[in-house]
Amino acid sequence: MQALSARGVPARAGDGLAADLVNAITAGPADDDAPAPSAGAASVAPTPPDQARAADLPATPGHVEITRPGQNATGPSAAGPAPAAGPAPSSAGRSRPLTGADERDFGVDMTNWSVAVGQSVVKVIHAWGSADRAGVILDHLASIGSGVTPALRGRLDWVHPRGRATVAMVTELIPGATDGWTWAVDDVLAHLDGGPEPTWPRQLGALAARLHTDLARMGQGPPAHGRRVRADAHDALTEALAVTGGDAGRRLRDRRGVLEQVLDTIPDDLTAPTIHLHGDLHVGQVLRANERYWVIDFDGDPQQPAAQQHRRDLAARDVAHLLTSVELVASVCARRRDGAEQTLRTWAGAGRAQVLAAYRAELAARQSCGLLDAAALEGLIVAQLLRELTYAATYLPRWQYAADTALTFRYGG
């Protein structure tokens, strides 16, 4: 889907479209004459997108509806304290409506069209159905007062004869925030130069545990099938071998045997319930400002089919992805500091241990220790590093070095 301005051309920051969306979505109910969302508009759990594409829908596809946090939530997602940060003030409470002059481009290439408008962020969805999962999850987290994400202001859904799809979301803007590929790398480089040891691994471990216990309130499924999880991990190796060329490909082939042994450590008998996950949990999905952290971007793993992203899965998969990103931070830092590879890999090992210890401690504090199948972690970390190689070969070749150096250092070859 393409966002168009009032002039019928692709929308850009400054033309007023994003401001109009914020004005409409954050308006109080009395100020907004959009159709009231129907009962059950937001379900307790995400459901897979309709198999039909937008082009297959009838020519008169229905209408749009504005949904605000908790407006239609039922069951577990409606339980708990009031949201820590509620919707933005209504349009009547503002001195003036927001306009194109209040819009600011983020200046980075994103999958969706995202613009800062005043104290909000507007995300207009490009891929059909890609934000339906995120919209429901963010509504759930807002409804229980989770506080692990920037506050959801509301979303715009297209209601059509075959269902509904989220087309835009408005969330809180965190002033001065940067993502982990900036602050995590900066902290580690400062530590190499004699600064304090980074504390963010502990912070992220606790944050991930809070996120998972909150997501578990959306409902839990039976444990994952260990053989299926292991087969999926071996598929990641097969795919990486097929697409990774050059010296990185040679190193990968040389250590295939040892990597297969690690993947085989994923046990048959997994015991943790499956829950809805973040799906792409790495340091780049965590904002930091004033020593506080927020998780963003619940669109799921871009390498997975949409239907698979909507399935419940084992929390260990998210944890493994987060632990992998600690290794990747070390790779980025090693590229910027010649001769520091050994020191950085030692730090990465300690950082992973801190993430995991803090994650377990927070689960224990929330009486949710059963959410983690720790025995699967090492195999899932290797599988994620292999997916990083596939991602690099498919989308971002310059990223290949990060997973390649991590795998080489940890497993030889």
Image: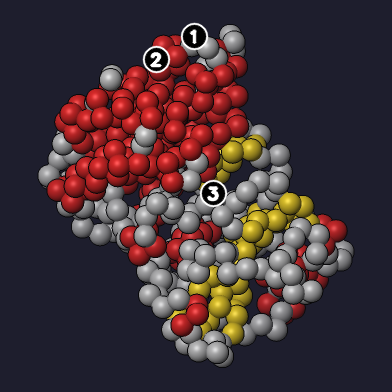
- Which residue is at 48% across, 46% downward? 395
User: 13 left or right of 239?
Assistant: right
Q: In this orientation, does residue 133 appear?
A: yes
- Dot 3 amino acid type: Ile
Tell which of 227 and 395 is nearer to you. 395
User: 12 left or right of 291?
Assistant: right
Return the mark for residue 346.
Answer: 2
User: 311 left or right of 197?
Assistant: left
How many other residues sit within 10 Å of disc 3, few (<14), some (14-19) or many (≥20)?
A: some
Coordinates of residue 165 in the picture (x, y in percent): 50, 73
Residues at circles 1 and 2 in contact by the CB criterion of under 8 Å: no
N-term mark: 3 or 1: 3
Secondary structure beneath dot 2 equals: helix
Question: How much space separates mark 1 and mark 2, taking CA atoms?
Answer: 13 Å
For marks 3 and 1, give the one nearer the viewer.
1
N-term mark: 2 or 3: 3
Q: In this orientation, does residue 196 appear?
A: no
In the rendered image, the quadrant that contains the C terminus is top left
- The residue to which callout 1 is attached is 339
> In the displayed structure, would residue 98 be above or below residue 257?
below
Question: How much space separates mark 3 and mark 1, taking CA atoms?
Answer: 34 Å
- The residue to which callout 3 is attached is 296
For marks 2 and 3, give the one nearer the viewer.
2
User: 366 left or right of 282?
Assistant: left
- Dot 2 amino acid type: Thr
